């Protein structure tokens, strides 16, 4: 995960899920214990009511003189029962027990809370009418005049409070899911909102690279402002380095030109035309290539917005005159776009490529423009020449490499093209032309936002 936004969102999401899961389990457990405690308290209250309504009768037995009052103690097999035992003998019980009694192990006859049909046909198996899960509370009370303590039991059907627990858990689950989704959406919005200043810096740097701005001008949050300040200081420092490089290049050109002029004059007096020709060529290359010596430090080489379509048309007219036998196809219906840069640099790039196409092509050159996006364009220049082997396509960018040693040149053309394009944060690569069969030069350049 190389994305800062994904990291923040993922870590926050994991924390939210774990927190809500722990909170849900805790709340569910607390609710379960609370419901059970309330249910147990209710049964104990009914048990105390039963004990309070019990009296010793004339036969030294226990009689329940008044009912508990809950109608479920009168409903057969309701799960709500009470029973009074004197030792192993059942002396009284609720009407809801019908024909059943609790045994000494707190189970109903016929199995735990299973009621069987007492009206059965001979040689047939009893059928289970209903099965319930009961919670039983029990207390032994000693009465005056009775030698043995009396055992009081009250039971209740646990389905009541289990249903309450299930309803609470269902509601809790829905609530936590909705809350979790809401928190994730909030985290997503928060992360995107929090990273907006970084996106603003990215857009501002793109404008600086294309020459639309010279520094970061917007106000940023306190946490990001130091970064913006450092970037502005770095841009200012690079600008000073470029200016210093320009000065050194100018000084070097001046220092070399003067000795060359003296040598040229001395050779001229000896009528040595060969050496004089080479001196003139050296002077031309010094003027041309010393301008490129500072390209590695160029951050402010761009100077103006170039209407690229219009610029290409002018370059094509020039080469039509120089190489009248070469036809250059160029689409005239494309929309104008702008490249922020030096006109000399663009002339160097397009001029070198067109010159190579005219030299090594046969009769035709095609220029195509592919707009990749609003900020990027690919320029394709193809010829109908012999092309290049695949292994040579990268070697031609090396300084001094020449395919034809008989042709006049320095071998710096494509190397300079590569240097200039990379200074503008672009790319250049070669491939075989599918349409013309020769070499195709592809140049990827950023375009300026108008």
Image: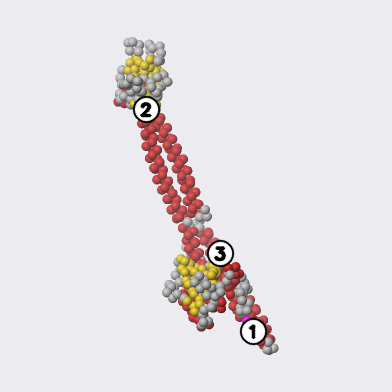
Q: Give the CA separation, mark 2 to mark 1.
A: 117 Å
Q: Is residue 156 magenta?
A: no
Q: Is residue 425 left or right of residue 399?
A: left
- Identify the residue at horizontal 53%, vertical 59% (top origin): 227
Residue 58 percent location from the top left of the image: 32, 10
Looking at the magenta stretch, what is its main secondary structure? helix
- Identify the residue at horizontal 56%, vertical 74% (top origin): 386
Secondary structure under badge 3? helix
* Circle 1 residue: 277
* Circle 3 residue: 234
Q: Give the CA separation, mark 3 to mark 2.
A: 82 Å
- Whether residue 249 is visible, yes or no, is no
- The one nearer the camera, 193 or 176, is 176
Q: Quadrant of residue 263?
A: bottom right
Q: Nearer the viewer, mark 2 or mark 1?
A: 2
The vertical placement of 178 against 442, above or below, is above
- Identify the residue at horizontal 41%, vertical 43% (top origin): 176
Which span of residues is magenta-colored? 277-281
- The one nearer the camera, 304 or 80, is 80
- Identify the residue at horizontal 37%, vertical 25% (top origin): 114
């Amino acid at each position: 995960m190389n994305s800062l936004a994904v990291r923040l969102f993922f870590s926050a999401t994991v924390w939210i899920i774990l927190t809500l899961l722990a909170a849900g389990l805790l709340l569910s457990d607390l609710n379960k214990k609370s419901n059970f405690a309330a249910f147990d308290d209710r049964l104990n209250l009914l048990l105390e009511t039963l004990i309070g309504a019990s009296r010793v009768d004339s036969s030294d037995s226990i009689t329940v003189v008044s009912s508990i009052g809950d109608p479920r103690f009168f409903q057969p097999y309701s799960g709500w029962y009470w029973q009074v035992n004197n030792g192993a003998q059942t002396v009284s019980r609720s009407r809801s027990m019908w024909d059943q009694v609790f045994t000494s192990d707190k189970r109903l006859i016929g199995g735990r809370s299973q009621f069987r049909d007492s009206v059965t046909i001979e040689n047939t198996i009893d059928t289970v009418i209903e099965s319930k899960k009961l919670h039983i509370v029990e207390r032994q009370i000693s009465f005056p005049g009775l030698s043995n303590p009396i055992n009081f039991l009250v039971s209740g059907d646990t389905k009541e409070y289990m249903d309450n627990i299930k309803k609470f858990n269902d509601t809790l689950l829905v609530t936590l899911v909705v809350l979790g989704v809401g928190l994730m959406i909030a985290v997503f919005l928060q992360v995107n909102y929090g990273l907006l200043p970084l996106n603003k810096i990215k857009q501002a740097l793109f404008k600086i690279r294309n020459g639309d701005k010279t520094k970061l001008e917007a106000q940023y949050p306190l946490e990001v402002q130091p970064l913006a300040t450092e970037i502005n200081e770095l841009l200012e420092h690079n600008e000073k380095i470029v200016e210093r490089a320009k000065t050194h290049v100018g000084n070097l050109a001046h220092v070399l030109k003067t000795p060359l002029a003296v040598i040229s004059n001395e050779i001229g007096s000896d009528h040595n035309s060969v050496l004089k020709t080479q001196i003139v060529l050296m002077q031309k290359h010094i003027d041309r290539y010393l301008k490129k010596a500072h390209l590695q430090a160029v951050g402010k080489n761009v100077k103006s917005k170039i209407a690229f379509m219009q610029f290409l048309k002018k370059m094509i007219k020039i080469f039509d005159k120089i190489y009248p036998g070469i036809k250059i196809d160029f689409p005239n219906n494309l929309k104008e776009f702008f490249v922020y840069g030096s006109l000399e640099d663009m002339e160097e790039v397009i001029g070198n490529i067109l010159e190579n196409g005219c030299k090594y092509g046969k009769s035709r050159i095609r220029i195509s423009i592919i707009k990749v996006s609003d900020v990027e364009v690919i320029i394709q220049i193809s010829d109908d020449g012999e092309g290049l082997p695949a292994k040579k396509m990268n070697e031609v960018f090396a300084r001094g490499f020449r395919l034809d040693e008989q042709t006049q040149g320095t071998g710096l053309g494509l190397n300079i093209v590569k240097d200039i394009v990379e200074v503008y944060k672009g790319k250049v690569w070669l491939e075989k032309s599918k349409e013309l069969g020769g070499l195709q030069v592809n140049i990827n350049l950023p375009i300026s936002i108008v």
